[in-house]
Amino acid sequence: NLAARIQRFVEYTYSRQQKTMSINQVKVLSLLSKQLMEELQCAINLPHMKVHPLFMFLNEFSFITMNRCAKESISHMEMAQGDTLFLPEQHANCMYFVSFGRIEYIRMVDHHGTEVKEFVDKGEDWLAEPALWTEAWYHVGEAKAYTDCEVLMVNPKAFEEILNVVRPVASIVATYCRSFMAWLQNLESEEGMLTDVIQGDQVSDTIQSFLPMWMVEKPEDNVGKMESNGELLMVSRWSFGAFRRTVRKSLRY
């Protein structure tokens, strides 16, 4: 079985490499300026992340922040069919988007061992978002590759450092974070509802409601508000990292 899996994955990876090339394989791209490289990385990664309302709005209101996130906080990982992404009770160290293929996720929903299976698909869902907002999230279920696939991984520490560069952006994200964690805590109160998976096609409207309303209602009229809104500028001493470190208690204990 192992030999067959290795052979099939090598064939799959080789076939993909014939059709696509990574940035590192194109030597001339090493000549790009820092900003151009960030913009290129963003153009590659953002289409997979825009399924999440927060990342979509970050791109609209602070594209420089989003460019840096795409280059400095995102990495890619190839997975063979059957590979394990994470296990229950494992400490979460990043958030995941599917960029190719499909992830299978299984979790227990009660004390009787009842299992629920769901799938995480490209362009619809994401995994382990609480890892961005708390250092104490432990995975609820098991995720593994249902097909050969590729995932994007968002590193919480790098994400935090990038957000802190632009304080109004940190304030917006903090507002979102508080609402998201309160929503997650409500899920915990309902048996069997807590999960690592956010099904974007089902809860995108809820997730979007956690953003400041002036961002949601008329985004085309509010591009300048991030710099001019007095309430946001009052957070000149804000540290997103300090806030994240205060959300230490795992919701599961």
Image (tube, grey):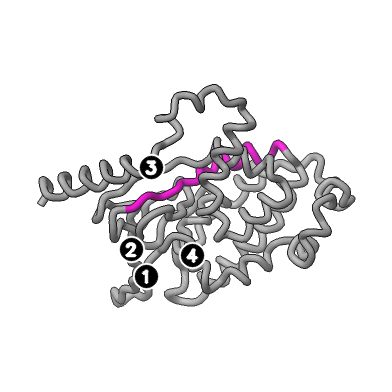
Tell me how far mark 3 sits from mark 1, CA to CA.
29 Å
State the SS at label 2. strand
Tell me how far mark 2 sits from mark 3, CA to CA.
25 Å
Region in magenta: 149-165
Do the numbered discs 1 and 2 sit on residues whose CB atoms are within 8 Å?
yes
List the single residue furthest toward the top.
Answer: 31
Label annotation for residue 20: 3
Tell me how far mark 1 sits from mark 2, CA to CA.
6 Å
Give the mark toward the camera: 4 or 2.
4
Type of the residue with mark 2: Glu
Label annotation for residue 104: 2
Type of the residue with mark 1: Glu
Picture mark count = 4
Q: Does the magenta stretch include residue 110?
A: no
Tell me how far mark 4 sits from mark 2, CA to CA.
14 Å
State the SS at label 3. loop
Tell me which label, 1 or 4, sits earlier in the chain: 1
Residue bearing mark 4: 124
46 is higher (above) or lower (below) than 102: above
Residue appearing at x 45%, y 66% in the figure: 195
Quarter where residue 183 is shown: bottom right
Tell me which label, 1 or 2, sits earlier in the chain: 2
Residue appearing at x 24%, y 55% in the figure: 82
Most foreground residue, 188 or 179: 179
Do the numbered discs 1 and 4 sit on residues whose CB atoms are within 8 Å?
no
Residue 202 locus on image (x, y percent): 52, 74
Residue neighbourhood size for the residue with mark 3, other residues' Cα within 10 Å, grouped as few (<14), some (14–19), many (≥20): few
Give the mark toward the camera: 1 or 4.
4
Compared across the picture, whether 205 is left or right of 140 comes to right
Tell me how far mark 3 sits from mark 4, CA to CA.
23 Å
